[in-house]
Every structure is written in structure tokens, then in C-alpha cells.
Amino acid sequence: MSVSTNYPGFIKKDADNFVYRRFSDFLWLQEKLQSNFPGAILPPLPEKQAVGRFSPELIEMRRYSLEKFLARLVTFTEYVNDPAFKNFLLSDEIEFNKVKESTNKDKSNLASALVFSMKDMFQSSGISKSLSAAIHKVKQMPTSN
């Protein structure tokens, strides 16, 4: 989908005011905004279709729904000023992919940190040994067929 805007503050100087975005990019934007504004109710995205997704009717319906999604977002100053939203609308494909990759790395690093933190918590509380013993007992139980 190509996205264009004449919204003040989003017009690029000496460049086309168009960017090309895939449906997965809209999903990324929605996820980032949910992360940046916990508890906020965001406009819905259209459902992802596995069958018939290239039919002209479905493409037009999806384009309209994505356009409506963006139109609703721009009514909220908080979203418009969010770096993820600005990158979505202003960055060329190469720069936008770099932004997405860096946020995915951040998410992966956070998940790893949480796993280690939970592991440390369980080990320090003695739960780890109890849990391991319980799992060991369950594995030794005869299975009924």
C-alpha cells in the first residue's frame, strides 16, 4: 500500500510524500503504539486473510480499512507525535526496516532479560528445586493407555 499525506509536520522536503507499506508494517505500527501507550484503545486493523487475499475486492476493502486506521490515528496528537508513527509515515523502506529491526532486537533483549530474571528469582526462592523435583516425579509416573 502506498501512503501519502499533506498533514503538517509530515511533509518531506525535496522528496516524494509517498512511502510503501505492507500489511505487516501496519501490524508493527499497531504493536508499537500499544506498547508506547499501554491501555489506550487503538482503532482496529482489518483481519488478515489467508484465502482470496489477492482478489480486487479484498484488496480494495483492506486499503480502505488501512486508510481509515491511519485517519483515526491522526486525530490523536499523542500518536502523531510518537516516533514509531513518524517513522512509519516518513522513513523510506531501508530506514524503516532498520527501525523495525532495532525494535525487534530490543524486544528480544527484553525477553531474554525477563527469562534470566525469572530464573534467578526461582533459584533464589528455592522454587526451582521443588519444581524440578515435581517434574521429575511426573516423568516417572506410569502412563495409562
Image (cartoon, helix red, strand yellow):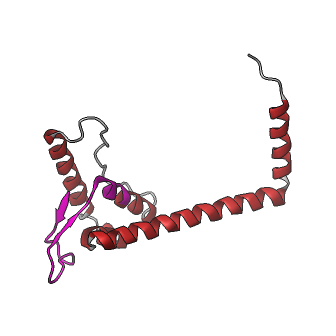
Q: In the rendered image, which quarter is residue 88 located in?
A: bottom left
Q: For residue 14: magenta?
A: yes
- Give coordinates of residue 43: x percent, y percent: 30, 52
Residues 102 and 4: in front is 102
- Can the viewer see residue 78? no
Residue appearing at x 28%, y 73% in the figure? 91
Q: For residue 72: magenta?
A: no
Q: In the rendered image, which quarter is residue 81 located in?
A: bottom left
In which quadrant of the rendered image does the N terminus lie? bottom left
Q: Residue furthest top?
A: 145
Residue appearing at x 17%, y 39% in the figure? 55
Q: In the rendered image, which quarter is residue 57 located in?
A: top left
In which quadrant of the rendered image does the C terminus lie? top right
Image height check: is 30 above or below 90?
above
Residue appearing at x 33%, y 54% in the figure? 24
Residue appearing at x 46%, y 60% in the figure? 38
- Give coordinates of residue 131: x percent, y percent: 81, 45
Specify start and end residues of the magenta stretch as a single range. Answer: 1-28
Question: Relative to residue 26, is residue 140 drawn left or right?
Answer: right
Image height check: is 44 above or below 14?
above
- Can the viewer see residue 112? yes
- Give coordinates of residue 137: x percent, y percent: 85, 35
